[in-house]
Amino acid sequence: MTDSTAPNSVASDAKKHRRAGGRERRDPKAKMAGPAYLTRNIPTYDVMGEENLQKIEATAERILAEVGLDIRDDEECLALFRKAGAHVDGMRVKFEPGHVREILQTAPASFTQHARNPARSVEIGGNSVVFSPAYGSPFVMDLDRGRRYGTLEDFQNFVKLAYACPWLHHSGGTVCEPTDIPVNKRHLDMVYAHMRFSDKAYMGSITSEERAEDSIAMSRILFGADFVDQHCVILGNVNVNSPLLWDGTMTKSARAYARANQAAVIVPFILGGAMGPVTNAGAIAQAHAETMVGCAITQLERPGAPVIYGNFLSSMSLRSGSPTFGTPEPAIGSMVIGQLARRLNLPLRCAGSFTTSKLPDGQAMEESVMSMLSAVHCGANFILHSAGFLDGLLSMSYEKFMMDADFCGALHSYLAGVVVDDNTLAMDAFRQVTPGGHYLGSAHTMANYTTAFYDSTIADNTPFESWSESGKTDSATRANARWKAALHDFEAPPMDAAMDEQLRDFVDRKKASMTDQWY
């Protein structure tokens, strides 16, 4: 796609469907359809009062002024901060209170990430909500073969599943590590898979500046160089090396995305008691300081470049030292993070379907729902890790992916809120149904039954006897059948043959230019 007007050509049609598709039709043969993204129709939940918010913000400013943070192996980044007036002493950078906030004033409050299919472009910021698959697992897991290292085939499978799922709006990024491809070459296959097997928005590589630039170069082939210079088409998920360290690999990748006018997602990974304080307020203050500096890097590189304020709070077992996910303290902490991001007027990435469970079981879904609801209520705009997260993110589970995606479908209805109009107030039904009667056959029920409630594709709502006679299957077993059926029925979105050839040629030439590296 090279026409610079193409991504806006069906914008009006896409808007018509953003509230539609939130519930599956009752016809079992009907193909589910979902919106390009969600528009929040319920308010965010502000859990912290003004006085305590100011205390956390003041602590973040004190961290930056009195302790500072290190920027390692990126002299250009240090030079940008030096030029902007920060105090730079070797690797250590300190800021006067309010300085970083001032830099962030050029960052947009919202932006569009354009997709190959314009109808699937997503809005990030404001009241928009975008669900994206889990990211970064070295292992994959399913009920048939158990836990194993991820391969390119697994990676492609998850891209296909995300494309086929109407409740996921984004293709994601490193949905699992394809460990059968050399480390220095796998980013090419991953970005190509997102482009070829999906037409939703996607993420690129951040593991080196060159790999980030390769991801952007492939996007320029797909969308056209001029269009990419003026519009966001790719995201890069950039992590702080907490506590208080930005290493050059990440800062260079963040600057590469910003330089190309593409969006970096700035994310500290704070494991409470290890990479940050064990107390929630201190961890939040540290995360706020680290994230603000990361976002500022993008604005110094290219003022006005899109950027997402990200966060990843987690806890740990203080008995064993093992990380724990989906626990209540990070969940409530995410709510505060949402308030802080809104005070900076930045789009937010926060939380997801987190769990430490090793199986797609009750623990997995209990922890995932705890964490995912915190993302929904804190006001997150881009929710990475919406589907597939298992084993503390070490494993991407096929069954968990389908169970999480089904919950995302339920969240479409939840975020739609309660519609109040003449139809939903149902006075015609009250007039038709006499006291003591029932609504099963009423005209109002017949007119609304196909969209009234969300129909889960995983849950079993039949009577016990029917469930027992059908094999007594559990959710994971039903999810196993669902992902297999989805892959069996998968049809790739069409792509122009010449465009596909250009992308393949780029990948082949880049691979041929370097020797394999496996670490």
Image (tube, grey):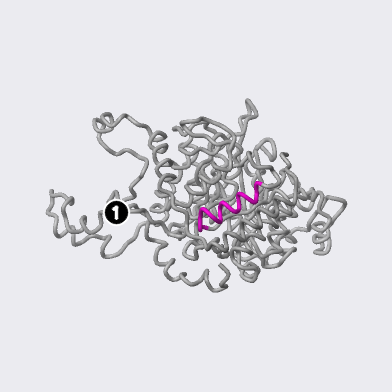
Q: Residue at x 78, y 58 (%)?
A: 96
Write down the residue under mark 1. Answer: 452
Specify the segment rendered in magenta: 186-200
Quadrant housing the N terminus: bottom right
- Determine if the magenta segment contains residue 290: no
Front one among 302 and 50: 302
Which quadrant would the C terminus be assigned to in this image?
Answer: top right
Q: Is residue 455 above or below residue 143?
A: below
Rendered view: 345 above or below 94: below
Q: Disc 1 residue type?
A: Ala
Expressed as whole percent of the image width and height from the top left, the position of residue 390 reads 53, 36
Image quadrant in which you'd find residue 110: bottom right
Q: Is residue 356 left or right of residue 181?
A: left
Please provide percent x and percent y for residue 245: 76, 46
For mark 1, does the 10 Å Cα neighbourhood hold few (<14), some (14 to 19), or many (20 or more) residues?
A: some
Q: Is residue 187 magenta?
A: yes
The residue shown at (40%, 63%) is 17
Compared across the picture, whether 303 is left or right of 343 comes to right
Q: What residue is rendered at 68% in x and 42% in y?
A: 182
